[in-house]
Image (tube, rainbow, N blue to C red):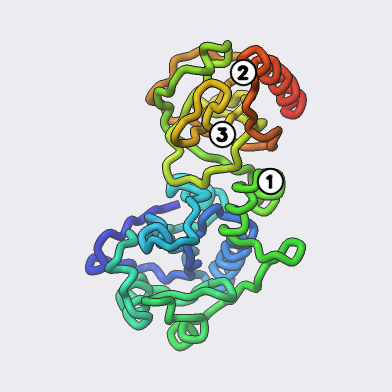
């Protein structure tokens, strides 16, 4: 898969004829996967190069929209997932206030036509351009447009925002089902307060950046370090038993792991929500509960 980064609209060029999926594609959930499937079908039928246009950073974050609750995927996550689905070329458009102000006409002229797009694949409710004034009917004036119908689960549209809300509510199992893969976050291991180490549970505290912050509590997870997969108990919270922190943290207690990994990038794969965060009356009661949690998680991950 070839990845092309677009930082300057004046330098856009591409000679190959493309069929292109359009969207942000946060999470690469089941709905997004239907778009990619259709894109590959059109690519094969019409002998066009399959491609996808995404943005970085998140348009919702740049525009400071209230609906922005964090990302399901970093750009690296998205690219890794897209690569698994067989797209040939990915264009990453730097999203800023200038791009946000582009009219629907200029979005087509300055971006899609300069990229030599012949066919586009979009969701039923796709919009683009300043104030979202462009829609699928407008696209049909310039391209062959393939519209993918809404995909629902129990009457609810499968969307990145819906999945984010599931994670915020702690429903990792359903979120994973709608993603079509287990939810993963990655981040650098940073120095924390070493409270876990003091009670016999040293943890890797990660900088989770712009990821959606899951519901506070304990999770059964796998943690990946240097490409190796380990069972782990992950806590999302603020250490209420020891000392309440100003900002929640995400920390992983990695089973049978004793290496110093400060400064390294690790990945955490969330499998199941175990319990809510709790303030215990003593450290001994906290340790006793953690002992039970680790046994439960070990059984779940067998």
Q: Which mark is residue 255?
A: 2
| Percent position of residue 287, x then y | 65, 15
Which disc, if any, is residue 32? Answer: none
Of pointers 1 and 3, the one earlier in the residue sequence: 1
User: Secondary structure beneath disc 2?
Assistant: loop
Whether residue 35 is situated above or below residue 253 in the rendered picture: below
- Above or below, comparing residue 182 to residue 18 in the picture: above
Q: CA distance from mark 1 to mark 3?
A: 14 Å
Residue 296, quarter of picture: top right
Q: What's the mark number on residue 171? A: 1
Mark 1 lies on a secondary structure that is: loop
Residue at the farthest left position: 10
Report, in whole angstroms, how far the alpha carbon at label 2 lies from the one at label 1.
Answer: 24 Å
Q: Residues within 10 Å of mark 1 (few under 14, many from 20)?
A: some
Please name whichever residue, 35 or 59, is drawn nearer the observer in this view of the structure. 59
CA gap between label 3 and label 2 equals 17 Å
Residue at the extreme front: 281
Mark before the other along the chain sequence, 2 or 1:
1
The answer to whether marks 3 and 2 mark residues whose Cβ atoms lie closer than 8 Å is no
Could you say which is closer to the camera, residue 33 or residue 125?
A: 125
Front position in the image: 299 or 6: 299
Query: Marks 1 and 2: in contact by CB < 8 Å?
Result: no
Along the line of sight, which residue is nearer the eye, 183 or 77? 183
Q: Which residue is mark 3?
A: 236
């Amino acid at each position: 898969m070839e990845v092309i980064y677009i930082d300057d609209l004046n330098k856009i060029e591409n000679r190959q004829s493309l069929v292109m999926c359009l969207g942000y594609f946060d999470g690469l959930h089941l709905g997004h996967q239907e778009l990619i499937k259709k894109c590959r079908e059109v690519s094969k039928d019409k002998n066009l190069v399959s491609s996808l246009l995404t943005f970085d950073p998140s348009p919702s974050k740049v525009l400071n929209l209230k609906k922005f609750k964090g990302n399901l995927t970093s750009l690296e996550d998205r690219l890794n997932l897209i690569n698994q689905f067989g797209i040939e070329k990915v264009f990453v458009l730097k999203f800023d206030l200038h791009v946000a102000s582009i009219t629907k006409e200029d979005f087509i002229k300055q971006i899609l036509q300069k990229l030599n797009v012949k066919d586009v694949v979009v969701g039923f409710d796709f919009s683009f351009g300043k104030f979202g004034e462009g829609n699928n009917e407008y696209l049909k004036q310039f391209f062959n447009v393939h519209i993918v119908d809404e995909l629902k689960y129990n009457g609810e549209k499968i969307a990145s925002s819906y999945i984010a809300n599931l994670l915020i509510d702690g429903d990792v199992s359903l979120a994973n089902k709608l993603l079509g893969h287990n939810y993963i976050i990655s981040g650098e291991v940073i120095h924390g307060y070493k409270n876990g180490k003091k009670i016999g549970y040293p943890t890797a505290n990660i900088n989770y950046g712009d990821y959606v912050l899951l519901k506070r509590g304990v999770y059964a997870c796998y943690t990946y370090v240097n490409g190796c997969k380990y069972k782990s108990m992950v806590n999302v919270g603020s250490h209420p038993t020891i000392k309440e922190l100003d900002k929640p943290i995400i920390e992983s207690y990695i089973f049978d792991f004793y290496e110093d990994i400060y400064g390294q990038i690790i990945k955490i794969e969330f499998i199941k929500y175990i319990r809510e965060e709790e303030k215990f009356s003593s450290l001994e009661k906290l340790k006793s509960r953690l002992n039970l949690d680790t046994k439960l998680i070990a059984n779940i991950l067998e």
